[in-house]
Image: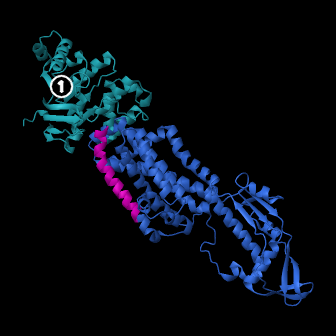
Chain colours: A blue, B cyan
Amino acid sequence: MMTSLALARNILQRIVRDVRTLALIVVLPLFFVLLYGNSFSGSYSGLRLVVVNEDNGLASVRTAERDRITLTVDLGNAFLDAVDRDVFDVVVVEGAEEALAAVGREAAAAIVFPKSFSNMIVNEAVRASGERKVEVDGSTATILPSDPVDGPTTSLRIDDSNPLMSRAVLASLQETFATVLETQQSSLTVGALLDVQPLYQGKIRILDFTAPGIIGFAMTLITVMLTAMSVVRERTSGTLTRILIAPVSAWQVTLGYTLAFSAIAVFQSAELLLASVGLFGIRFVGSPGVATLVIVLFAIGLQGIATLISTLSRNEAQAMQFVLFLLIPSILLGGVFWPLETMPAAIRPLAYAIPLTYANSALRKVMLTGAGLANLAFEASVLAGIALVALLLSVLSMRRQASAA
Amino acid sequence: MPAEEVVRAEGLRKRFGSQIALDGLTLTVPQGQLFGLAGPNGAGKTTLIRTLCGLLRPDAGDVHLLGWRMPSARVRSQLGYMPQDFAVYDDLDVIQNLQFFGELYGLRRAQVRERAAELLGLVQLTDRRRQRVGTLSGGMRRRVSLAISLLHKPRLAFLDEPTAGVDPKLRRSFWDYFTRLAEQDVTLVVTTHLVEEAQRCHVVGFLMAGRLLARGTPSEILAETAATNLDDAFIALQERGEAR
């Protein structure tokens, strides 16, 4: 144990003496958080929506009392009022051709309301929901369902070159339409039909949802790089040979490395978490102790994998390339941006072979839903298993390290 | 086997791909001998030393060090090894390097201080003990490396070109020290390219293409090659080796 502590202290001492490496270790997590916190909000803004509003605002309906009457509802303008201005920059123009042509160039979408827009909406709404009473000129009129209304439809042209964006545009516009329709069909609002009970009161933003994965990815990136490079350098410089020829067991060496590099990884994770919560208000409702446990297990596994990578590499350049074989699947398959459930079944086993998948899932549960250790038993055991296997393999590979030098 | 045979290697074979590095090599070194390993570049000197230390596993053959069959964890505390590369921590200062490796050998701080004082005196780096190793010259770094290798008072030391880049005056004091160690029954196996160093060895082995072409005291080598100095003797041996 003393020997392992001496090894760990040696590694940390050298890092502290190497001012530039020390600075990088401290600054890198902060840099990461600042970048993703500012760049990745998870929602769109500033998308240009071109609107042509030819709607005359009138709806002609049949009534039981006085045959047809004309109501002024002005749904085209109601729509314009309801558009989510956080997402869209609305530009109102004349001329449908010009508006539709703008899509794919400066506009993300264009919508053209025909002259009879209000008329159509009101009649369709009544036809769907049945007769209803309205106050007109001081007396009550009963509006009767009428036959389907013919006329020009409403055009919505969307730039779908970016499917993620076009889906968001469509979703936002549909929501706007729903709002407008609710003004005409109050009995059929979503709120009236469903008792919606969001488990977390809708407080989990997309930024919160992605944060644990991004923190886990940053840990993977930083820890594996630092450890793999340090061990390769220790070998190419010949100092590892000296360590291995000394009366020190492979276990002691591995333990020393694990202590030092896991300590650095835990420090950097703490920095990542604190900066995320402090600077961007990332949701963290769980126990810091449980989060720390997850991070420690994950860190031990990562540095073990990094040691293995260093065994397979003759020099730093090779180690770098090997590291990518861990990083690329981690970011794509670790469930950081899209859930595992969206991945084709054929590739899912690969996702389950990635440590980040479990760290991400566990951190998400702790940070977002406040899950305790009991709810993390699966993730924690897998991470512990990965850590153990990585350590065992590191010990075995230590023997190879010297002869590979 | 006789206890004084500190190094006993039999039938060592090692190849790297198609390159034969050790070709059925057999070697014994008795206790307290200063054994010089000479030979042209690529003769297999470093491979031999690494194989003897247990860093490389031979394809065939056996190595016994201090009576233990290698690889053995038991000899490690009594084994000193100075690799050809510096193998020092550039970011640490001289004394920190010594302290770290001293701890690996289980030396207490006071012991390290005492040994460091002696060895830094030998390699003439006492006034640089607090200097960062990365800022030292190549020759000085090699001196740090030598001090590390001998810190734990090994009974058997393998030194791979310990004097490369070291100035002649200091080189001489190194060899005086090696001779003193041998008198204290420490066994040393030292590789060298320099004739004047080979002359100071008790026994010299001339290695070429993974085989020991000659082995004997410097005067025996001279007699065998009918040369007047070791330089000519080594050249004669090399030409003999190339002719085979």
Up-down relation of residue A348 to residue A320 (above or below)? below
Quarter of image, res A51: bottom right
- Name the spot of residue B51 as percent of width and height, x first: 21, 36
Extreme-left residue of the structure: B1
B113 on left or right of A81: left
Residue of label 1: B35
The chain letter under disc 1 is B
Q: Nearer the viewer, residue A402 or B239?
A: B239
Extreme-right residue of the structure: A137
B169 on left or right of B180: right
Q: Nearer the viewer, residue A317 or A371?
A: A317
What range of the chain is rendered magenta? Answer: A381-405
- The kind of secondary structure element at disc 1 is strand
The amino acid on which the numbered mark 1 sits, given as a three-letter code, is: Phe
- Name the spot of residue A284 as percent of width and height, x first: 57, 63
**Residue A264 shows in this picture:** no
- Name the spot of residue A208 as percent of width and height, x first: 59, 62
**Residue B100 shows in this picture:** yes
Quarter of image, res B53: top left
